[in-house]
Image: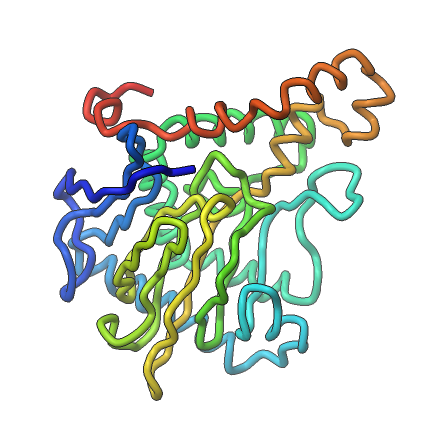
């Protein structure tokens, strides 16, 4: 789908890490659309300290929590993870906040200033590199608030509706995150104590790309579109990660008029039939959500 991939270096305001490039790296397709960005991190010691503190909190949660087997072994890998935020699916009549026994732990985690700073940076990076998707997310959040008055976002300063803390030594299997919004990027921030030249790299299999992924750095990835995985860190090292995303089902629920697909079909048969006719061409809309380098330079949204 992405076509020919090349590297483009631009906006030299960020640094990937002391080990890597001092500018973001983006992968573009043959039409110059930006499909992925290795953002890096702000060149700010206080941000580095906050990123390290957030990683320490995740590692502490990983060690102190009595994880269930299902939380430690899943289709993304063999590591413990916990989720927090709004989801939609599995027969739910409307989007709702995730529950479960990890909710209190995760609420305390996302309310930490260090977590909120990294989450806000992820969201701001999303707005900078993928302004069309960001604008849609912002609009959908407003619509969701109108439909569900209890919707209160997820993390202060972030447009994303959900997040995951990967709390024990994290390396992922080859996978796609098919439930995430297809025309948008999730934000991934790596953390821990490891040598990024000897492990932890992010592989984008469909693009045939490997990115160094140092602690504290962020990558924006359309995880529903491209198969991706991590290389394990070397023995003795520790790696965790923090991701933000929004379930595509939330946006579909809103497109259906704040109702399930079955309700849409029953209450508006003509509108539902038209939606089905348009569905095979929706991939054009997905591609249009990715800006070209020229559009970004010109500030076109």
Which image quarter: residue 196? bottom left
**Seen in the image, is 74 located left or right of residue 271?**
left
User: In terms of depth relative to the viewer, which is nearer, 240 or 173?
Assistant: 173
Residue 161 lies, with reference to residue 266, above or below; the image says below
Could you tell me residue 251's position as x and y percent?
61, 31
- The residue lying furthest to the right in this view is 266
Image quadrant holding the C terminus, namely top left
The tally of labels here is 0
Residue at 43%, 30% in the rendered image: 133
Q: Is residue 154 left or right of residue 55?
A: right
Horizontally, residue 97 falls left or right of residue 108, namely: right
Which residue corresponds to the image point at 37% horizontal and 54% vertical from the top-left?
204
Q: Is residue 127 left or right of residue 6?
A: right
Q: Residue visible at 33% across and 28% down?
A: 291
The quarter of the picture where the N terminus appears is top left
Answer above or below: position of 200 versus 137: below
Q: How is the image coloured?
A: rainbow
Above or below — where is 176 with respect to 239?
A: above
Furthest residue toward bottom: 236
Measured as percent of width and height from the top left, residue 216 is found at 29, 62
- The quadrant holding residue 7 is top left
Q: Residue furthest top?
A: 270
Question: Residue 54's x, y, as percent?
Answer: 38, 65
Residue at left 40%, top 50%? 206
x and y, in percent, of residue 203 in the image: 36, 60
């Amino acid at each position: 789908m992405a076509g020919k991939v090349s590297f483009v270096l631009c906006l030299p305001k960020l640094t990937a890490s002391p080990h890597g490039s001092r500018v973001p790296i983006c992968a573009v397709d043959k039409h110059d659309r930006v499909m992925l960005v290795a953002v890096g991190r702000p060149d700010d010691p206080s941000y580095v300290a906050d990123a390290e503190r957030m990683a320490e909190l995740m590692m502490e949660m990983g060690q102190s929590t009595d994880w269930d087997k299902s939380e430690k072994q899943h289709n993304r890998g063999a590591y413990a993870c916990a989720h927090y935020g709004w989801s939609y699916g599995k027969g739910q009549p409307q989007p709702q906040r995730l529950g479960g026994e990890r909710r209190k732990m995760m609420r305390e985690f996302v309310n930490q200033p260090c977590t909120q700073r990294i989450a806000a940076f992820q969201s701001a990076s999303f707005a900078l590199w993928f302004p069309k998707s960001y604008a849609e997310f912002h609009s959908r959040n407003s619509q969701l608030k109108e439909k569900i008055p209890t919707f209160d976002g997820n993390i202060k300063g972030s447009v994303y509706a959900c997040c995951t803390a990967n709390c024990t030594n994290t390396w992922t299997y080859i996978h796609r995150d098919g439930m995430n919004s297809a025309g948008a990027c999730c934000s991934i921030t790596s953390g821990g104590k490891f040598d990024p030249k000897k492990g932890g790299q992010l592989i984008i299999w469909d693009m045939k790309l490997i990115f160094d992924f140092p602690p504290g750095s962020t990558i924006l990835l359309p995880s529903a579109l491209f198969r991706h995985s991590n290389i394990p860190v070397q023995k003795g090292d520790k790696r965790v990660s923090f991701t933000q995303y929004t379930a595509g089902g939330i946006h579909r629920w809103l497109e259906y008029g704040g109702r399930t697909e079955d309700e849409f079909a029953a209450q508006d048969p003509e509108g539902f039939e038209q939606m089905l006719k348009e569905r095979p061409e929706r991939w054009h809309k997905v591609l249009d959500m990715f800006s070209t380098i020229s559009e970004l330079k010109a500030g076109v949204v």
